[in-house]
């Protein structure tokens, strides 16, 4: 999806608040506990090499969760990675969400140098305004070999 299409989708979703985003009368989404995640979230994360207590890499992004289990990620424009696409699920027993995101990575000359996956467990507060939990990311080379595994923690705050 192009940046223009992403911005258009975000602008269109901006007219809908979190409650309306899961109202079947206005969005078609069923009003079930799983759909509490639907909407736009701003995330701050800190990650570093797994097995250490060092988290030198700070990450900021926006996550747009859609009813039905798909999501999009938007990052500050740069030439080294694409926007992410992913899926999410909900476990009613634990009341936790899981998400998996993937994005391509590029060299400054436009050559594809691989891709990355990011997995998160998310526990939402009772007000539905924040989600937090561990992060696990893997960077792969273009041939599919693992470059690095990163672990950390992220907090997402609902924007609308």
Image (spheres, helix red, strand yellow):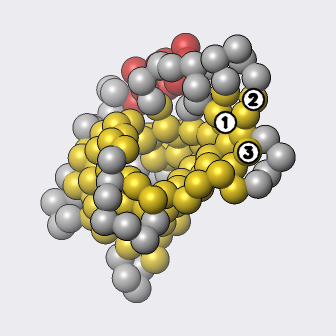
Vertical position of residue 157 compared to residue 51: above or below:
above
Q: 38 or 64, which is in the foreground?
A: 64
Instruction: Say which element carries label 1.
Output: strand
Whether the residues at callouts 1 and 2 have beta carbons within 8 Å, the answer is yes
Residue shown at 49%/38% (left/top)?
Answer: 73
When asked about the image quadrant of residue 85, the answer is top right
Image quadrant for the N terminus?
A: top right
In front: label 1 or label 2:
2
Q: CA distance from mark 1 to mark 3?
A: 10 Å
- Numbered circle sitting on residue 81: none
Residue shown at 32%/58% (left/top)?
Answer: 54
- Please state the horizontal and vertical placement of residue 87, each as a whole percent of the image: 58, 54
The answer to whether 30 appears left or right of 142 in the picture is: left
Mark 3, residue position: 141
Residue shown at 69%/49% (left/top)?
Answer: 140
**In the rendered image, is residue 148 in sight?**
yes
Q: Earlier in the sequence, mark 3 or mark 2?
A: 2
Mark 1, residue position: 104
- Please state the horizontal and vertical placement of residue 43, each as a whole percent of the image: 32, 44
When asked about the image quadrant of residue 95, the answer is bottom left
Q: 137 or 158, which is in the foreground?
A: 137
Mark 2, residue position: 112
Q: 13 or 40, which is in the foreground?
A: 40
């Amino acid at each position: 999806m192009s940046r223009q299409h992403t911005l258009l989708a975000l602008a269109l979703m901006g007219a809908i608040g979190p409650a309306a985003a899961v109202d079947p009368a206005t969005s078609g989404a069923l009003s079930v506990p799983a759909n509490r995640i639907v909407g736009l979230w701003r995330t701050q994360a800190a990650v570093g090499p797994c097995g250490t207590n060092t988290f030198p890499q700070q990450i900021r992004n926006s996550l747009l969760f859609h009813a039905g289990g798909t999501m999009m990620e938007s990052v500050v424009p740069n030439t080294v990675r694409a926007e992410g696409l992913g899926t999410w699920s909900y476990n009613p027993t634990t009341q936790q969400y899981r998400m998996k995101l993937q994005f391509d990575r590029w060299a400054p000359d436009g050559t594809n140098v691989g891709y990355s996956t990011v997995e998160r467990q998310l526990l939402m507060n009772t007000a539905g305004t924040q989600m937090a939990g561990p992060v696990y990311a893997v960077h792969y080379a273009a041939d599919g070999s693992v470059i690095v595994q990163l672990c950390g923690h992220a907090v997402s705050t609902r924007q609308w």
